[in-house]
Image: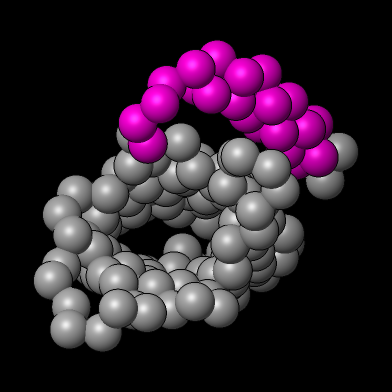
Amino acid sequence: MKSMVKIGLVAVISAALVVPAMAQYAKPQGLSLRAGFFFASGDGKAFEGQNWFTIGLEKKMKDIESGNSESTAHYSLSLDYYGKGGFSNVPLLYNYVGRNPDFYYSVGAGVGFGRTQSGSSDSTVDFNYQLSIGKDLNFGSQPFFVEARYFGSGRTALSGFSLVGGIRF
């Protein structure tokens, strides 16, 4: 748990150092950086405990035309990592992101590069998906967000919920 807290602090400090440098760009980059905690379920929870570390990067790809001026949508590509001990997963997902004035939601699917180690090590490539809901928090000019996300995997040991905070560039 102590190492997970240290990794989380390093990620937050790194993001805080990068923000002033990125603020010099006038045009948004369409990138989101997030970090937080992953709450494992299944065998992963039994072997490594429930609280894991997660970090992710998401790139906005293409806007989707909408007839509603209050709601917008776009496609994105995301790469995440979550793990602890001998269990980890790196899902690469293509996502649909919908935005309302009060919140946003996302659904995505792709592949996950998983590793489980309960006796012997096993690395696989499986179908992965995610469902999420989030809220933008605008403090000044830099957009922050909080998000709840469910990661599903073909291997139940690598499925679970995450709570993250992040920043958009």
Q: Position of residue 84 (x, y in %)?
A: 62, 47
Query: Dividing the picture into quarters, in which one does residue 167 lie?
Result: top right
Viewer can see residue 68: yes
Q: Where are the magenta residues, as a range? A: 4-28
Q: Is residue 157 above or below residue 121?
A: below
Q: Residue at 19% across / 49% down in the picture? A: 61
Q: Residue at x 23, y 63 (%)?
A: 74
Q: Is residue 32 above or below residue 19?
A: below
The spot of residue 49 in percent (x, y) is: 72, 61
**How has the structure been colored for display?**
one colour
- Horizontal and vertical percent for residue 91? 33, 53
> Residue 96 is drawn in which quadrant?
bottom left
What residue appears at the point 39 percent right and 73 percent down from the top-left corner?
99
Identify the residue shown where x is 69% and y is 26%. Answer: 16
**Extreme residue in the right direction:** 2
Q: Nearer the viewer, residue 99 or 69?
A: 69
Q: Is residue 97 magenta?
A: no
| Percent position of residue 1, x then y | 82, 46
**Does 18 lie within the magenta span?**
yes
Q: Is residue 3 visible?
A: no
Q: Is residue 16 left or right of residue 43?
A: right
Count of numbered circles in the view: 0
**Which residue occupies the foreground of this view, 156 or 120?**
156
